[in-house]
Image: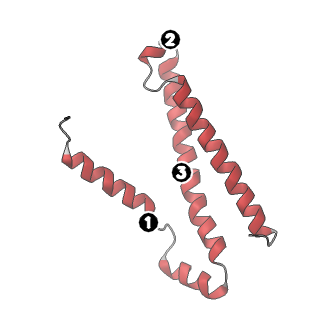
């Protein structure tokens, strides 16, 4: 069995929990709930997370491209197939999110 660095594992959990925290203050969530605008505030929360994730994907792709120039596929940190899956994930998440926002804007959501 591999030797696990527990400090790194704790840090990973902390980062994950940090990501799950609401971006907007709880007062804003409460006011939105009272005004019947909960869905819009939830979409703002999701938008921030999706945009952050897509930004990270773009940075990853840029760094990967820099490494890839002149390197063989074996030297790459991520395979080309993995990069394609990550880009597809970003594309699908963004498309579905836009659809959901349009549905709420049209009064269907």
Q: Which mark is residue 21?
A: 1
Give the CA distance from mark 3 to mark 2.
Answer: 29 Å
Rendered location of residue 68, percent (x, y): 50, 18
Residue occupying the point 19% across, 35% down = 1
Which residue extends farthest bottom?
A: 34
Q: Is residue 69 above or below residue 41?
A: above
Q: Residues within 10 Å of mark 1 (few under 14, many from 20)?
A: few
Which residue extends farthest front?
A: 1
Mark sitting earlier along the chain (3/2): 3
Rendered location of residue 105, percent (x, y): 78, 68
Q: Which mark is residue 52?
A: 3
Rendered location of residue 11, percent (x, y): 28, 51
Residue occupying the point 43% across, 15% down = 74
Q: Which mark is residue 70?
A: 2
Q: Is residue 49 above or below residue 81?
A: below
Give the CA distance from mark 3 to mark 1.
Answer: 14 Å
């Amino acid at each position: 069995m591999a030797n696990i660095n527990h400090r790194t594992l704790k840090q990973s959990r902390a980062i994950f929990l940090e990501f799950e925290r609401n971006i907007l203050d709880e007062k804003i969530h409460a006011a939105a709930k009272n005004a019947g605008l909960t869905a819009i505030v939830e979409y703002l929360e999701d938008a921030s997370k999706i945009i952050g994730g897509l930004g990270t994907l773009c940075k990853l792709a840029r760094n990967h491209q820099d490494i890839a120039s002149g390197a063989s596929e074996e030297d790459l940190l991520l395979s080309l197939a993995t990069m394609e899956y990550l880009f597809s994930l970003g594309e699908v998440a963004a498309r579905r999110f836009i659809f959901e926002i349009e549905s709420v804007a049209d009064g269907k959501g």
